Structure formats: structure tokens, C-alpha cells
Image (cartoon, helix red, strand yellow):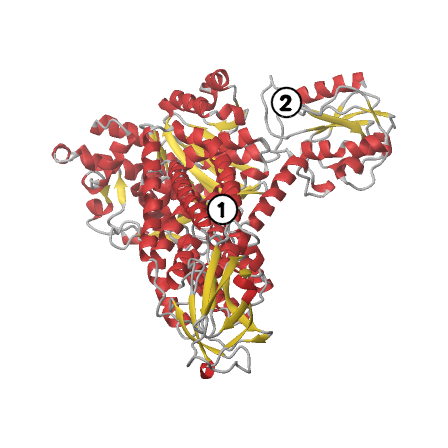
Amino acid sequence: MSKMEVRRHLVVLLPLLFLGLSEGTEALTSRCAFDLIDFDPATRATLDFRVVDVTFKARQGLPTGGEVRAFCKETYPQICEVMEVTSDGILDLNENSNFSSTLHISIRGEFLGITELLLECDGEPLELPEYTVRVTRSEHEDYMMGIFNTLAGAFIIFINFLLGTQLEVERIKRIVKFPVGPLTSICVQFLVMPLFGFALAKLIIPDNHKALQLSLFAAACSPGGGKSSFWTIIFDGNLDLSVTMTFTQTVIAIGMMPLWLKFLLGPYFFTERLQIPIEHLCLALGGLIGPVTIGMIAISFNKHLVERLNFVIKAITWCGTVFFTAFAIYVNWYAFFLFKPYVVICACALPWTGYLIAFAVALLARQRHRERITIAIETGVQNLAISALLIITAFPEPERDLALVMTFAIVLVTDKPLILLYGFGWLRRKFCRPTVHQSASQVPINAVMIADGPMKFIDDGASVKTIADRPPTESPAYICIEKRDFPVPPHKPRPFSAMRSKRLDSFLGSAKMAEGTPSSKVRLIVGGDENASDGIVDGTAESSAVRPSIRLRSLSLSVPPMPWFGLDIGGTLTKLVYFEPLDTNEYIDSEEELVRSRVIQRYLTTNKAYGETGIRDDHLQLSDVEINGRLGNIHFIRFPTERMPSFISLAKDKGFAHMSSTVCATGGGATKYAKNTETELNMHFHKADELESLIKGIEFIAAANPDECYYYDNPLDDEKCRKVIWRWSSGRCSSSDLEAQNEEPQDGLQYPYVVVNIGSGVSVLAVRGHNDFQRVSGSSIGGGFFQGLCCLLCKCATFEEAIELASKGDNQNVDKLVRDIYGGDYGEIGLSGDTVAASFGKICSMKERDSVRPADLARSALVTTTNNIGSIALNAANQCNIDRIVFVGNFLRVNPIAARLLSNAMNFWSRGTKKALFLVHEGYFGAVGCLDRLVAVTEMRRAQRAAAAQQAGHTAEKL
């Protein structure tokens, strides 16, 4: 520290006492003949000491003298400097001075460290015991460090409170229940990182710097924490996982740090005076748990607090990071002079390698992208305050300050890659627009050709290659390409881009296009874009170099804005499917839209109940699903259709309409509630066909979830009945069969197959390929028939009540069986005695009728319904020559007993050759089909194409 604020002045008094043996002794013939007797005080001097008395004894009791020069041992940086020696260092030890004299040596501290005070007499070094001078922090520096520690602690407590407002108990419970993320982080943090830190300490840091080696190893053993949650917020990681990992790692560090110090560090370092800062670890836990709990309690009383804090938490995080980084540099600026190459290498290698290793391990553990980011940050960003306290308790000053240079270096470099990554991402979002990743021949478009004659349509879904391959005589002069290919309301006209067809290749990077009628002018109209222009732009090379970015931007937005929903509004129940993107930042440029999107995302994904009747079936959630190139999770939510007005109010309150203008919906309610939705939310229901949505939803879910399909083995045996996962393959086989055949299953449904949709009635569909299905059969005896009978015979009020009643009954008390007629099995035609011969046959008898219970009647109604459905389904499958039969529909949603009865009916009618297959996400396929339709590039409605053509015609007239 040069000429410091940290400087201290030390005055070292060196009394040099020369004792004569007797008066009148002859003059000494040799100079500087004296010896050191003692130091006072006996401890070696520090800068806190002002005076040190040094006693010398003349050799042989003869007078002596000389010119004494004092100086500090030369170091870099220079630790101390001798400022003054009294009497210019001249000593004259004789009888008059009682053979003694005192020199006052003033020393000024220049830099923290340890050095030696050296003396010369007449240019010759004095043979004295080593005298150590320690330069420590000044009182001012200690005061500023105290202020820094106090402010940093208060800020961490405040940030932990803010973090608590962003957490959800249910998500934390889910993490604890399936702790793959925390376990991955713990393995890397407490196994890989200590070994890597130990290797760095032994291989790179010289062995004479034990304190630095210990500081590096202690940092490697420290738990994650510190600013990890800050960076998790900034990078939109899983905050619940981050806080959970910080807590668990801090607890585990209480045991793991002593373990590593004893078994690995002990043989190489002096560990007898090392003390694990258990008290500080407990304080760190309290500083985390207390504020976080208060934040969670506060949010439970004020739900709107989440939305308000969402706008400021990032700003607070950034400001705090910048302020405390600058403050830390100010109070530790001396450390920069001690940054040796090996210090910098180790400080960078430890956290940066931690990021990479943790991310790779999380990837191998098949964690989602958000979890991978969180685990990497939690591993690389460590709670170095714990390692610093270990060093402070192990070393005195200034050794502790010198050892803490490594800790300070790690603090400085830890987040630099994160800052660079965030800055790069911000610049990319700010100045670079997403580009089209498909080749020109793969880009689906809806285009209107404007030639000399009337306008013509290219078929929806045609590609640029289709246009390019047209003969020159049919090539248009202009091509208007829609900016996006998803449904929009009629009152919100579609934006277009119009350009010369010969320029299309330069805009889209396609192959050389056939030239049509050339034009020297080009009009670009990009609706909703601040760069849109109604003026004429020269069709020159210069203009085409400016406009492609606008064109590429518009073409890349061929999917609707977030959030993505699919709705199936049935007569009784409404099913909502929500796609939660994991990469929101990639596709939302506006900070306001980003915050609003996160508010919606948080509300839908962190609650399991919405109001009194809304339920999120979190056990059905699908993770890491890719839709149109975007990775995310799919959530499944249901509520009674009668609560649809409440849903509209909630959507309005959460700002859904600010994010999206169109929602794909199916079911009767899509028509019933369309007007209310448009009036209240300014959102348009794009109505999708129910059967088409059903098939698309089944195929989408089956492809996303390999364990979607199952069947029942021993369906009527309560003890032996079990679900068996069915994975489609080239043949008809179950998962157990696949193991025997060594055959790899193919995920997703394989064509052809039969879908039996059981609602109020029954529809049987034969699906032979993509978009190739037809209704081949059906029946009026379905869910409505069963519920109606139960309401009539058993006075049941709801479907659920009827199912509950049927589960307690025995149909054999109501139905006439084969054995009731033949006294046993009817072997000649292969009928078992337990086979139903006549549904409700026994109640024809007055005697039997009086003993029948309502539960038996309900069970008989259910058996009658399922037997009839099974027979119809098998007949349809046989007629279509299809083996696979899948049963779906709301009749099966909360009705496992009906599924088991259907399995039994299928076994009976097919004589065991076919199985009744069921799907896990029962009831949600229509909503999933709507979600798939919303984001896929699909066929546009004729009315919307007409509107597009009209808009293109106006463009052509102006041109």
C-alpha cells in the first residue's frame, strides 16, 4: 500500500548500551564491537508497537562506536520503509556515556505483510537475531471493513426476503420429493469441487505459500450460496431449486468441511489450529431461512406483491451487485498488488470449471434447461464468507489478510463469465433479430400471387421452393407473404410483406428464382412493426440490403406470442392446457411483456388450485416438451364450465389479453362463450373441430410421453389387477413382451388404430394416418345412458356419485348370468357361467327385485354400458382390420372401475386376442389438440384467406 491511508508510523527505539569494564581503559582498536543482549518487548514487533528497546553489550568491555544504518528487507511490494535514525546513526560508546547509547528508528508501513528490520555498522551487517516487522490494517481500514460487512449482511437479508416472495411451497415440496437436482448439485459441490481445488492447490501454488493453498481448498469445500440466487433470478433459473440447494448444501457443509480437512488436507497442511466456523454456518442458515420465511408469509397475505416486486427485483439485484463489488475493491485494494499469475489462474479455474462440470453433470442427469442453469450457478458461485472465517480463525494478522487474497480473487472473477453471457444475450436481443433456421424450401408460407391478371392463391403451407419452381410465365410480379400463420380475429387485419419476386431469394436466402415481370419499385408493409412504411422503396440492391432483417423477423414470427393455451370447453368440465416455456427471454423483447409473461407463468405453475373449483393436475405435467422448436413444460388444468365467467375475469386481471389475441378452443363452450371472451378480453376464440382436436391431442401426447398408454392385467381381480405400460412397436406387444423379444419400442402411436371416444354417447374413429381418420361406428349407449339410468333408478345427483355407488355394488344380484340359466358353464359354445346372459334380467322377478340394493343397480348399469361399448369397438376394429383399440373420453376420467370393466369386456369379445388400451392424460386431448393447432402452421380458414387476398389487392393497386 503506497503512502497509505492504511499507513502506520512505528518508532522503534534501539538503545545500544555499551558497558565499560573500568575507567581509564584504552581506546578500542576495533569499531562496532558490541552484541545484542535482549529485545523489549520480547515479542517480535508489529506496527502497533511504538517502541522497542534493544540492549547491546560491548565486547571485551572496551569502548567502541560506529555509524549504524537501519533499513527494511527489500521486497515487492515494499512492506516498510525506515524514515529516520536519530543522530544520523552515529554511536560513540565510552566511559562518559556509560558505554551505552540509544538510537530512535522511525519506520513507516507501506504494504500489508511480514518483513525484517536489518542493521549495518560502518557498512557491515550486524549479526543480530532476526527481527520481524508485521504490517497490518490500519484502524481506518478496519472501520471501513466493518461497514462493508454490516451493509452486505443487511443487503443479503433483504434480498433473501425478496426471494421468499418469489418462492412456492408446493414447488419446494416437489423438489424435495424428487431431489434429482439437489443431489446432482451436492455430488458436484462436495465431491468434485474439493478434489479439483486440492489438485489446483498442490499443482499450481508453490508449497511455500501454505496459507494460499489452504484458502483455495477452503473455498472449494464451501457450500453454494452468496450471489447464486441473484444470478439465478437474472438468468431465469429455477429459484425454488436454488434456495433449496443453498439450504441443503449449507447444512451438509457442517459435516463435509471437517471431513475433507481431516482426511485430505491433514497430511499436507497444519490442521491443529483450523476450526470449522460452525457458528457462522448456523448464522448463514438463519439468515436464509428467516427472511425467506417472512417473504413467503408476506406474499400469502398480499398476492399482488409478487407482481410489484417482479418489476424491481432484477434492478435491485444489479445495483447491489455493482455497489458491493466496488466497495469490496475499495476496502481490499491492496490485494491487487499480490495477484501473482498462479493466484489468478487458480481463482479463475475453480468457479469457471465448477460451472462447466455442474452443467455437464446436470445434462447427464437429464435435468431441464432451467435446472441445468441453476445447478451450474449454485456450484460455481460459492459462499466464500465461510472459507474466509476459517482462514481468519487459523492465522494471525497479517497472514490472514495475505491468505484472503485468494478468496478475494475468487470473489472478483466468479461472476465475470455470467456478466459476459448476460451482456451478450442482451446485445443479441437488442440488436439482432431471430433468423429463420429452415432452408428456403422448408419455410411454410401463405402467399398471394399478384400477376397481370386477377389474384391467385398458392395453397396454404406451400414453400418458397414451390414459388421458385413455377415456370416464368406463371411467376408473379409481387408476392405478399403473411407475417404469421396462426388465426387472428377478423377485426385485426393480418400484416403483410410485399416484394418483387426476383428479390425473394435475397430476402430468404433461397435458390435462384424464376424471374417474373420485373418492377423497379417495391412496397414493404409490415403490420405492427415500427419500421413499417406505406411509401415506395427503391428496389435496388441498397434497399434490399436494409429490408431483409425486417423480412426475416416477420417470417420468424410464424407462431403466436406467449402464453400458449388450448381450451376444451365441454358441457360440464373445461380443460385448459398451458405451455410453460423454459426460454422466455429468447422470444420476448419487451421487458414489460417479459414480466407480465412471468406473472402469468408463475400463477399457473405454482398453484395446484385456483379459486374454489379450479384444479391443476400436477401429476400429469409433461416436462421438457418441444413445441415448434421451443422447450417447455405442459400443465393440465380443469374447472367446471359453469365457472367460465370467473375464468374470464381472472384472465382479464392477469393481463392475458395483453400477451395474446387468439386462443384455440373446442367443445360446445367455444361457441357459447366466444362473445363474452371477445367483449371482456378482446381475445378471439379460434374454434377447432372436436374430433380433429382429439386425434391431434392423442398423437401429440403419445409422442411426448412414452409411458402414456397402458392396459389392465387381470382387470376383475382386485388383488392381482395391475396397470401395464404399453409401448407401440412394429407389432402388437406389451412392454414385458419387448424385453423377451429384444425389440426397441417406438414412441408415439403407430398407424392404424381405432379410437373409441366415450362421452355422453360413443363415437368410434378409425385413424389410418396423419389427418386421415373417419367415424366408422357409434352408439347412443354411453356415459349419458349410464348416468341417466343411475339418476332414475338410484336417485344419483352427479356422475361421480353414480360411479362411487357402482364401485360398491355387485351386478350379479341384478343381471341374469349363464349359470342362472344352465346351472354352470355352457361349454358347447364356450360361455363361462359368470357371463352376463341378460342385463337387469333378475329384477323381472318380484322376489329378486325387492332384495336389490341401489349400488347393485348402478353396477349393473355400468357393466351393461361397458359390455355394449366393448362389443361395438371390437366389431368396428374387425371391420377395419385394425388391431389397436384405444378408449378415451370423459367417461373414463375419474372412472377406473369402468376401464377395468372395458378391459374385461374386450378380453371376452376378442377371446383374449385384443386389449383395451387407455391413456394417462384422459380428458385433456381436445385441449392439447387446440394447443398443437395454435402453434403449428396449419390450413387457414377461407374467410381469413379472403381477407388476406383483399389486403394484397389493395397493395397491388397502390403499387
Q: Is residue 476 above or below residue 42?
A: above
Mark 2 lies on residue: 944
Q: Nearer the viewer, residue 716 or 721?
A: 721
Q: Is residue 199 above or below residue 351?
A: below
Residue for point 76% across, 31% down: 547
Disc nearest the viewer among 1 and 2 = 1
Q: Is residue 81 left or right of residue 507?
A: left
N-terminal-most mark, 1 or 2? 1
* Mark 1 and mark 2: Cα distance apart in space: 38 Å
Q: Nearer the viewer, residue 226 or 759?
A: 226
Q: Is residue 274 above or below residue 532?
A: below
Q: Nearer the viewer, residue 888 or 29?
A: 29
- Which of the image's four quarters has the C terminus? top right
- Specify few, some or many for label 1: CA neighbours under 10 Å numbering under 14, 14-19, or 20 or more: some
Mark 1 lies on residue: 370
- Specify few, some or many for label 2: CA neighbours under 10 Å numbering under 14, 14-19, or 20 or more: some
Given contact means CB atoms under 8 Å apart, are the residues at marks 1 and 2 in contact? no
Q: Amino acid at mark 1?
A: Arg
Q: Secondary structure at mark 1?
A: helix
Residue 275 x, y percent position in the rendering: 34, 63
- The image quadrant that residue 924 belongs to is top left
- The image quadrant that residue 586 belongs to is top right
Q: Is residue 693 above or below residue 35?
A: above
- The image quadrant that residue 521 belongs to is top right
Residue for point 31% across, 44% down: 901
Q: Nearer the viewer, residue 822 or 524?
A: 524
